[in-house]
Image (tube, grey):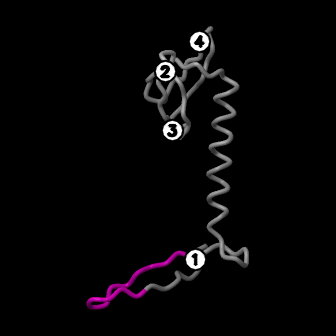
Amino acid sequence: MIVLTRLNESTFAVNPDLIERIQASPDTSVVLVDGTTFIVRESVDEIIDLIARYRARVIALASSFTEESGEPRRAQLGVVEGDRVTTRARKGVR
């Protein structure tokens, strides 16, 4: 999520994956894929920078899900046997 500021100074968070377009005329409008429009204080360039930083954080977080050896962690499945759960790594899943 990125945080934007309305003209009345209230802030809100929006999922950047739902942004269809950003336009300045002269106020900055953020239009979502469902047609919802927000008028915000941030410039087009500032919003693009916020989205780029958001995506960089997502990639950094995803890359942190690796073993210390640098190999991706294997998915864990749980098998219910009676009243206990046994976990094991899935073969072929990275």
Q: Left or right: where does residue 18 sit relative to residue 55?
A: left
**Residue position for label 3:** 15
Front residue (pair 69, 12):
12
- Disc on the earlier residue, 4 or 2: 4
| Secondary element at tag 3 | loop
| Secondary element at tag 1 | loop
Task: Say which residue appears at 64% left-offset and 35% top-offset.
Answer: 50
Q: CA distance from mark 4 to mark 1?
A: 48 Å
Q: CA distance from mark 1 to mark 2?
A: 41 Å
Q: Amino acid at mark 4?
A: Asp
Q: CA distance from mark 4 to mark 3?
A: 20 Å
Q: In this view, which residue lies farthest toward the bottom?
A: 82
Q: Which mark is residue 74?
A: 1
- Disc on the earlier residue, 2 or 3: 3
The magenta span reads: 75-86
- Disc on the earlier residue, 4 or 1: 4
- Disc 3 to disc 1: CB gap under 8 Å: no
Q: Amino acid at mark 3?
A: Asn
| Secondary element at tag 4 | loop
Q: Left or right: where does residue 34 sit relative to residue 22?
A: left
Q: Amino acid at mark 1?
A: Arg
- Disc 1 to disc 2: CB gap under 8 Å: no
| Secondary element at tag 2 | strand
Q: Which mark is residue 27?
A: 4
**Residue position for label 2:** 38
- Disc on the earlier residue, 3 or 1: 3
- Disc on the earlier residue, 4 or 3: 3
Front residue (pair 86, 91):
86
Q: Name the mark nearer the viewer: 3 or 1.
A: 3
Q: CA distance from mark 2 to mark 3?
A: 13 Å
Answer above or below: position of 74 versus 21.
Answer: below
